Image: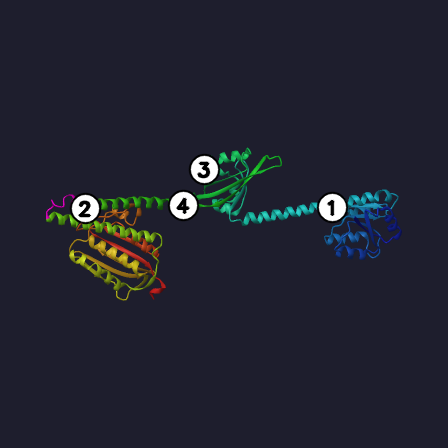
Amino acid sequence: MITVLCIDDELSVVEYISTLLDKTKYRLTNINDGKEALYFLLTTTEPPDVILLDYNLPSLDGLQILRELKAHKKEYAIVFLTADETLENVVAAMKEGAMDYLAKSAYLKTELNIKIEKAYSSARENTERKIKEQALKESDDRFRIIFEMANAGIFFANYNGQIILVNKVFQELVEYSFEELYTMDFSEFTHSDDIIKENELLQDLYLNKIQQYRIEKRYVSKTSKIIWVDLAVSAIQDEDKEPLSYVGVITNISERKKNEQQLKEIIISKDKFFSIISHDLRNQFSSLKGITEILMRKENQLSETKRNMFLKLLHLSGNNAFALLEDLLKWSRSQINCFELIPERIDLHEMIKNVNMVLLNQATLKHVKIVNEVNDTHYIFADRQMISTVLRNLINNAIKFTSPEGQIVISSKTENSFDYISVKDNGVGMSEVILEKLFRIDSKHSSPGTEQEIGTGLGLILCKEFIDKHGGEITVKSKLGMGSEFVIALPVLSGTI
């Protein structure tokens, strides 16, 4: 039912209007005072569908009511009633917001229902249009917020590759402003190796063979940085499924790609490492197998001297195989974090003294002097077992590669929030080629010592693993014929105080 409010002080007019309206379709109410009508219209929560507003009213005329409603941004479907045959008031009323007018004349009978229906329909259309406009505005606002606040780069482009719109994340990623991007197409900052592949996908998108695609590709930024992105593209079509443009969402995956490449390199390095280790183990056990076969086949033919020689070789091969397996076991445990870092306060001078005692016989046999210059007040905070293993390995290597009557000096200092421990010898030194291979898992290197001592080649790799676990670093300086110096750098922790 359509509610009609008639604002008119002439009771006869109101009663006449009432007789003209179908009571099953319209519900008519009346207010006969201007101020009362204005107050109602400004405060009501149940507004009428159509208002018939007379010009001549007590206390406030129709034009004044229209002006006040306009000032308060109140919109109603108003048909202006006038008994004045001139159009001056009608024109003024239409300017102030009336939808139509109706003369109090003989035409009232024929035009009343038409005018009310027209005003009612127009009002509904206006309301629906405003609801749609508001919904569209809210949708646009939401889109703008998502577009600008998204963590991903977003762009709109046409099928010629011209950019229509991009968000801030996209601009920051490729380091071009929107003004610059607007004059460019994607081929200008897409990596040359990725252009053909994406053009084929865009062509399929344009021809409606696919509705979307997703690829990993590279952009080249304004400063020539290579940026890997995950790109998802969807087509935008009209009602007839004709292509209009497309939208893309990109995520920066450069860090992931970097990690993937590092992982590939690690896998390749470890594959090579295990190949080297398997070869070394095969050699050791081949030697054991060969010696034992000789001893078994020629047990009664060998002199005591030769038998002892083969037994010594057997013992040496067995020791070398055991040392290799032991180092390999330690390394593998470090890789799967079986070694738990348990830092404690350590008297560095005392630790080195104990390590030297373990290696004393080896050094004495070669007449190599080990000098402990570490101050007895120098304490470090580290894992005792790991650091002891590292020092034992470095000092053992120094003995191995130092000629008889040589010297090894162990010293330390604290500087720039790091504890430095140096193991320096005056032995044979190393070439640049060998230095480049140290600490590398993919190029295990082992050289015989000055007395032909054999090593496993895993010791320095294990040392680096243990120092890395402490957040430290191990470096080396060496020259052929002038000796080597290995330096451990450990971050000074609160536990050293």
Q: Position of residue 214 (x, y in %)?
A: 50, 40
Question: Which element is circle 4 on?
Answer: helix
User: Which of pointers 4 and 2 indicates the residue nearer the eye?
Assistant: 2
Going from N to C along the chain, the mark reached first, 3 or 4, is 3
**Can you say which quadrant of the picture contains the C terminus?**
bottom left
Give the magenta-colored segment's residue range: 291-303
Residue 260's disc is 4
Q: Residues within 10 Å of mark 4 (few under 14, many from 20)?
A: few
Q: Amino acid at mark 4?
A: Glu
Q: Which residue is mark 3?
A: 194
For the question of whether residue 388 can be seen, the reply is yes
Q: CA distance from mark 2 to mark 3?
A: 62 Å
Q: Which residue is mark 1?
A: 124
Q: Amino acid at mark 3?
A: Asp
- In this rendering, position of residue 48 left or right of residue 290: right
Work out which residue is located at the far top of the displayed protein and give it. Answer: 207
